[in-house]
Amino acid sequence: MSLATRIKSWFASQQPEQQKGEEENMSVKLAIVYYSQTGTNYQMAKWAEEAATEAGAEVKLLRVEELAPAAVIEGQPAWKQHLEDTKDVPVAKPEDLEWADAIIFSSPTRFGNVASQIKQFMDTTGGLWAQGKLANKVVSAMSSAANPHGGQEQTITAIYTTMMHWGAIIAAPGYTDASLFAAGGNPYGTSVTIDQEGKMVEDVQAAVKHQAKRTVQVGGFVKTGFGQ
């Protein structure tokens, strides 16, 4: 048996212990804040929403406001269609972050950094930050790019840099589940590659769901004073 197989078997055996206490997470409030141009990060956010709800969290799925000019969007059918399809998803506001105990961000990569739409939203949080209302939030992040080394991990760590300024508690996946050894799973946060047809190359659903449940679990620990 290979080392990787033995590690995966060990994680599988530990799964009940890792999920222990999900029933105690009923009071955890999770905000999932995403930007998606054609649907990838929206789908990841939906998987996270599903898993977090299963874990007992109260979840808000929120998109950040689109900043691109209408003329640019009009010339790209997939972008235009996705915007139309998700028009009823609530737009994230700073008060949603104040409401939340835990937050998951999901952003496509733009030159190794977050999409400007996500950055603009983060830049509106100065008032909450100045009041200390973002400190001790439990946070995690996900990303996507058009090739396997397109800056996904850098985008995630860029989000975490902002979270460090908040004084937030980063709940990175680490290697806490066998799904993290699959393509798209990594210790920073789930990332996925998108092909030329706009489809996900890797199957990251299990990794996203584990990351969401872990974020809720850590949020529950922090909220209830676990270990104190």
Image: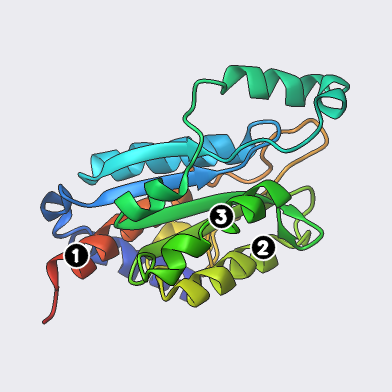
Q: CA distance from mark 1 to mark 3?
A: 25 Å
Quadrant that contains the N terminus: bottom left
Res. 155 mark: 2
Residue that label 3 marks:
124
Q: Residue furthest bottom?
A: 228
Which label lies toward us, 1 or 2? 1
Expressed as whole percent of the image width and height from the top left, the position of residue 15 reads 26, 60
Q: CA distance from mark 2 to mark 3?
A: 19 Å
Could you tell me which residue is drawn at 72 percent across and 38 percent down? Answer: 67
Q: Secondary structure at mark 3?
A: loop
For label 1, count other residues whose C-alpha is less than 10 Å away and answer few (under 14), some (14-19) or many (20+): some
Count of numbered tags: 3
* Sequence-first tag of 1 and 3: 3
Residue that label 1 marks:
223
What's under tag 1, amino acid-wise? Lys
Res. 72 mark: none
Q: CA distance from mark 1 to mark 2?
A: 28 Å
Expressed as whole percent of the image width and height from the top left, the position of residue 152 reads 68, 60
Could you tell me which residue is drawn at 14 percent across and 73 percent down? Answer: 226
What's under tag 3, amino acid-wise? Thr
The quarter of the picture where residue 197 lies is top right
